Image: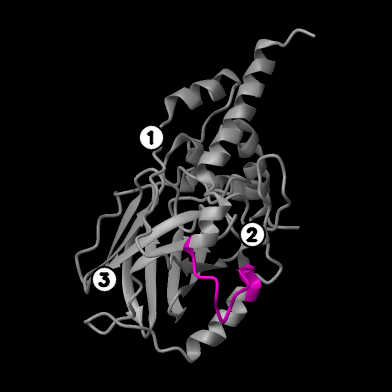
């Protein structure tokens, strides 16, 4: 049977997807030898880890920096597949599968408004995942891989292996940025609440997704992250997402960061060219374009048109 042009394009997309998954997924052997294996909360299942970590943090006095703050410096591994789907999902051709990362609500489901859930499913068919185009994803997008944390009294810095990612979070009283500044990862500001680092992020450009299931948001989204050492080599990470234009209520994910304990370990560089034009051309030939985002006004109009929830 002769393969059509569209058929060849779809086959090419499938091959590219497999390659991307291989590039973005750290080899299991590396993950096994570079992260701490012993923990008072050894189960990485988000709901189980979250419950254990909340209790463990109460009795732990963390190592501290010279200024007296918990010392989170080092290289950490986030063992999660929540970037594939925030909810529980099975293993498939392009997914490794995993449990839900959502701990609130307790059913582990993203509380999307009905119109937004429908729109997300449509978006997944019409648009390429912005992450596949090497565009930056917002917090709490949880791509598996290594991150290095650096901290001073005034800043908390995160360096990532993929796409030369970095994030600088001020911890001081520097002036806030204007409302007209909108960034892929938003604008973050941190503070310490006891032994927990709290990071609040706003000013998103709303042109990306929270996971590969096209769960989107508007520029009104606010994310509050909480990082707490529960033992020397484990951080309890929580992130609460709030965007009333898209979701029926705020929701929270929880995950474990495990410290690399191998002497001399260095993060590998996962180079990724912004806009990835070669890949985008393949998708465009199949009629799939880059996600354009949604404005606050568009979301509110869609919400009003859908009417009250049944």
Q: Depth-wise, is mark 3 or mark 1 nearer the camera?
A: 1
- The residue sitting at 42% across, 64% down in the picture is 262
In the rendered picture of this protein, how many numbered marks are placed on residues?
3
On screen, 229 above or below 163? below
Q: Which of these two is toward me, 283 or 44? A: 44
- Could you give the CA–CA distance between mark 2 and mark 3, rounded to whole angstroms? 30 Å
- The residue indicated by pointer 3 is 171
- Asked if the residues shown at circle 1 and circle 2 are in contact, with their CB atoms under 8 angstroms apart, the answer is no
Q: Does residue 142 appear in this view?
A: no
Estimate the x, y position of residue 207 in percent, counting from the top left.
45, 42
Magenta highlight range: 34-48
- The residue indicated by pointer 1 is 274
Label 1: element kind = loop
Circle 1 residues within 10 Å: few <14, some 14–19, many ≥20: some
Estimate the x, y position of residue 93 in percent, counting from the top left.
70, 39
Label 2: element kind = loop
The quarter holding residue 32 reads: bottom right
Mark carried by residue 110: 2
The quarter holding residue 263 reads: bottom left
- The residue sitting at 46% across, 44% down in the picture is 295
């Amino acid at each position: 049977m002769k393969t059509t042009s569209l058929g060849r394009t779809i086959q090419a997309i499938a091959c590219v997807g497999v390659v991307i998954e291989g590039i973005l997924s750290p080899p299991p052997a590396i993950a096994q030898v570079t992260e701490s294996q012993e923990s008072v909360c050894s189960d990485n299942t988000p709901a189980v880890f979250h419950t254990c970590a909340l209790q463990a943090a109460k009795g732990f006095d963390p190592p501290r920096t010279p200024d007296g703050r918990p010392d989170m410096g080092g290289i950490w591994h986030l063992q999660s597949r929540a970037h594939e789907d925030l909810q529980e999902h099975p293993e498939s051709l392009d997914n490794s599968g995993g449990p839900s990362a959502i701990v609130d609500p307790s059913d582990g489901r993203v509380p999307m408004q009905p119109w937004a859930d429908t729109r997300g499913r449509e978006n997944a068919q019409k648009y390429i995942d912005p992450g596949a185009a090497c565009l930056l994803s917002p917090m709490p997008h949880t791509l598996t891989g290594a991150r290095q944390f650096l901290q001073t009294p005034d800043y908390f810095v995160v360096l990532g292996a993929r796409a030369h990612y970095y994030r600088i979070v001020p911890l001081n009283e520097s002036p806030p940025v204007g409302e007209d500044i909108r960034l892929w990862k938003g604008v973050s500001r941190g503070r310490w609440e006891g032994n927990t680092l709290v990071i609040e992020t706003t000013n998103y450009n709303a042109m990306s997704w929270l996971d590969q299931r096209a769960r989107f948001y508007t520029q009104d989204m606010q994310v509050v992250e909480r990082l707490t050492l529960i033992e020397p080599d484990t951080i309890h990470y929580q992130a609460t997402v709030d965007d009333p234009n898209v979701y029926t209520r705020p929701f929270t994910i929880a995950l474990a960061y495990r410290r690399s304990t191998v002497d001399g370990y260095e993060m590998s560089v996962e180079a990724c060219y912004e806009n990835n034009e070669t890949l985008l051309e393949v998708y465009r030939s199949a009629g799939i374009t880059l996600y354009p985002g949604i404005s606050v006004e568009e979301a509110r109009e869609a919400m009003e048109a859908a009417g009250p929830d049944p």
